[in-house]
Image (cartoon, rainbow, N blue to C red):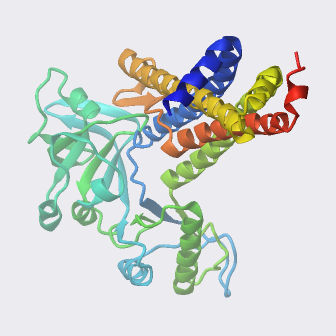
Amino acid sequence: MFHWYTEISASLMRNKLRTFLTGFAVGWGILLLILLLGTGTGLRHGLEANSDAIGMRSGSSSLHCYETRLPYAGYERGRTIQLYDTDIQLLQRKFPEIESIYPQLNKWVDNASMEGEVISANFGLELRAVFPEYDEEIQQVPIVEGRFITVGDMKSRARNVVIDDKTARSLRPNGGSVLGKLIFLGPFSYTVVGVYRLSGSRNAVCYLPFTTMAAQFPDEGVAYSNLYLYCPSITQEADFEHLEQRVRQTLALVKEFSPEDDWAVYMSNDTLSTSDMMGKIFFGLDVFLWFIGLSILTIGVIGVSNIMLVSVQERMREFGIRKALGAHPKHIIGMVLAESVFVTLISGLLGLILAVALLWGADYYLATSGIGSRQIFEGVTLIFFQNPVIPPWVAVTSLTVMVISGVLAGYMPARKAVRIPAIVAMREQ
């Protein structure tokens, strides 16, 4: 074994330029491929990290009812579709993938006031009636002080409210907590029990117990036009569209409208739609990066093949002398293959290590310097590049392809060379 190592080392050192060119072709191909794929992965992870910026839960959907657009069963178009508690119970029984259903109840007021401080909203301040599960299943409400709506609030119809931090600061310009303070929202008064961080471009919303608002607006707390649905098992847009079609068909039988009327009843899932769109974008990006990376790898393979072919041609005289001294053809071929494996493996590993180091360094620099992220709104920071790791199989496969290419590139001309008679081979210059 040591004899083989010494012989290979001596052969490689005698041809330093050839060894360097072969190793450079392999290492450069691996380096660029890993850098490209790692960069694509870093961009993907960065954008995926921004998915929670709007706070929507992945399993949350909405069901909306409007007017019918199609005449059906003797009814004219333009009928308003509304849902009742019996309809909610029907959907819960028939569709096990819908784990929870919550009615939507919203009101808008022109202003809010606290202890003489009054603020006005340009487009109105939304009062949203919610259930305690809203924060966990529908939309994240990042509480920074106090608490969210509880089961106790629901049972007692407590006149409690959770407001956003911007509204809280406007109501208390001199500082101080708003917890426990009385706030007037339109004609109604509530006690502030929690403050949440308002992030991004979301409008300010004041959260009330559903039972409280339903009691204050009894006519609207019976019939609903919008529902929140929690469907955590629905992760693909195709499955969501199938569920929407089945829900519409079920309600069409009860409410007597056309099952094809997608204006009367329709469902939406912004998070799933965005995720599906981003998935298509990243698939296209992956295909593009793989195409570029494999093209570079192919160029490296061709380079290795050409260098090995020239190498064997240059060593024809050496092979002839070895055969004349009694060397077996298998020994000569084995020596060429060993040299090829040694050079491609070492060079490929060096290229791989350098690529991983560069990716790690870029990730660390972008994270610590702040260049890789930017705050677009208060509380919302977009990340452009994060954790540029690649699957181990990609690195192993790339390295294996280069090594095998080097072996084949050396084997074919070496096999041809050893078939030439020794006396003929020794005449080669």
Residue 424 in which image quadrant: top right
User: On the rendered structure, is 78 left or right of 38?
Assistant: right
Q: Residue at x 33, y 30 (%)?
A: 379
Q: Residue at x 88, y 27 (%)?
A: 423
Q: Is residue 163 visible?
A: yes
Residue 409 % position (x, y): 76, 35
Position above or below: 268 against 308: below
Residue 396 % position (x, y): 54, 41
Residue 247 % position (x, y): 52, 76
The residue at the far front in this view is 325
Q: Residue at x 71, y 41 (%)?
A: 330
User: On the rendered structure, is 27 left or right of 189?
Assistant: right
Position above or below: 408 against 31: below
Position above or below: 221 against 365: below
Where the C terminus falls, by quadrant?
A: top right
Position above or below: 117 against 145: above
Residue 400 % position (x, y): 60, 41
User: On the rendered structure, is 112 left or right of 418?
Assistant: left
Residue 307 in which image quadrant: top right
